[in-house]
Amino acid sequence: MLFKHWAAVRNFYKYQPLDYVKDYFGVKIGLYFAWLGFYTYMLIPASIVGLLCFLYAVSTVNDHPPSNDICNNYLNITMCPLCDHFCDYWNLKETCFHARFTYLVDNPSTIFFTAFMSLWAALFLEMWKRYSAEITHRWDLTGFDIQEEHPRPQYLARLSHIKKKTVNIVTKTLEPRPPFWRMRFPGVMISLSSVFLLVTMALVAVMAVILYRMSVLAALSIHGDSVITSHAIIFTSTTAAFINLICIMIFNQIYARVAEYLTELELQRTKTEFDDSLTLKIYMLQFINYYSSIFYIAFFKGKMVGYPGDYNRIFDSRQEECSPGGCLLELSVQLAIIMVGKQAMNTCMEMVIPLLWKWYNMLTVPEQQREAYNRWPRWAKDFRLVNFDPRGLFPEYLEMVLQYGFVTIFVSSFPLAPLFAFLNNVFEMRLDAKKLLTHFRRPISQRVKDIGIWFKILDSIGKLAVITNAFIIAFTSNFIPELVYRHVVSTHNSLEGFLEHSLASFNVSDYPEMYKPRFNSTTNICRYPDYRNPPGTFEEYKYAPIFWHILAARLAFVVVFE
């Protein structure tokens, strides 16, 4: 019945028979599918609103004056070189394609959608608490206490030599009491230091991708061809995102194995305590692994680069800079490739690996028994299926919670994220059901009262999302500079002339000799995106007064949005 009415993909639009799932697989698996179904259902309004905002951006992309000015063939704006010595001056209209695409994610509807998603995240958690309470009551889980759990066999095996005992106040049985300083403390310290080392490795990988991006962008700029230069930023961002995705998938395999070993060292008494510690540890590592490159683009790239005559350098190299339209498009590309690529690869791995193991187990049937295989009883055939790992739901929860982070923390840069998440989850739910029914042996039923530490992680993500989206809109998008220009600078409350206003000027004769472009050029003045005083004026190249007005408006927006 479950295979026909629940696991079939054609039934994706039907409600799940959760009570039957719970009766067959147990409470823990039933609760996972209840949460996954509820989360997918809640993605429907977020997907619709995100799609409408994206369609609004597509329909108004030709009505954005700054983008039109960049694409204006008659507006000849010479930009300063993108690298030292070897790069030449270039024309701003070469970034026309980049500017049009940037508007799709950096437009007025972004503010509305971000505020909507902040409310959606809070509403999702509150409604899940109510739905979870209903399920807990219906499945009679309200009286479950963690002290009722028996100690893990691995825990008892490591403490078999301990003579000191303590009485469990619930079960009234004697249990070994491990010495804190001699056994627990060293394990915890080894675990913390190892996690720190793994986090450092992930950050080093991010730095390597940053160096790749800087090198490739400089190489493409040196080429000089207008077609290559106009698509250099998109090409560099896309390839860097794919390299980052590969690094992420490699680190995933390392984290899963190392984290389990480290959690064993901590001497967690029960399976629930062990799972919670392992969950928190791996999620922290995966958070750094998946989100560090996105945080870099959102909050650090192009923020403290200096100006052409006095760049802020690291190891004598210029920092990465944003294009005149900002870094929001690069952030969107990075987010889209990592999110969609991760989902596609995980889905393939989840379906292919159990199937391969199933075939392998079938091939191990002795040849003389294969003819009689079809007459075997069902339990004998099921024994040849893949054994279900006791923590088999962990990667499923982890995948969905990481996806929830993409949908909420950085949604201001990718309004289609909820739609992609919804489409993935619709099929993920039925494929997970089919995988459990046909590829794995029936798991041993396990009693739990909720989704455990995952709820606390989801709650923390929701709070973090409000902060990150406020800062992305204020400091990464052009919303605040355009708002200030429209209401403070412009005489007719429009964005006409905003492009000229947002580009500072630099006298090429002020270039230090060691960094001056080697190409002979008749250019006297080049432009760069910033708000600084022009050359030849009082306090030349210092921040102009409008910069401080914009900074004050950005900080005020963050406070109001919070």
Image (spheres, rainbow, N blue to C red):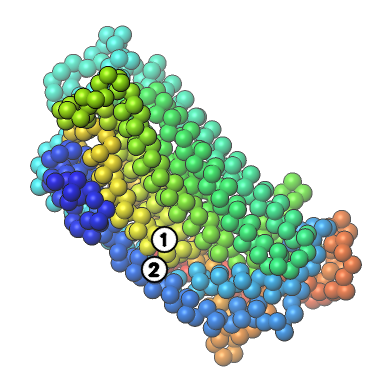
User: Quick check: marks 1 and 2 in contact, CB under 8 Å?
Assistant: yes
**319 in relation to 183, above or below:** below
Residue 352 horizontal/vertical position (percent) = 38, 40
**Quick one: label 1 or label 2, which is nearer the N terminus?**
2
- Label 1: few (<14), some (14–19) or many (≥20) C-alpha neighbours in 10 Å: many
Residue 365 horizontal/vertical position (percent) = 29, 23
Mark number for residue 90?
Answer: none
The quadrant in which residue 494 appears is bottom right
The quadrant in which residue 526 appears is bottom right
**540 in relation to 440, above or below:** below
In the image, taking residue 247 as reference, residue 411 lies left or right, namely left
Which residue occupies 56% across, 47% down? 244
Mark number for residue 417?
Answer: 1
Q: Nearer the viewer, residue 249 or 102?
A: 249
Which residue occupies 59% across, 90% down? 491
Residue 288 horizontal/vertical position (percent) = 49, 44
**Residue picked out by circle 2:** 50
In the image, taking residue 418 as reference, residue 445 lies left or right, namely left
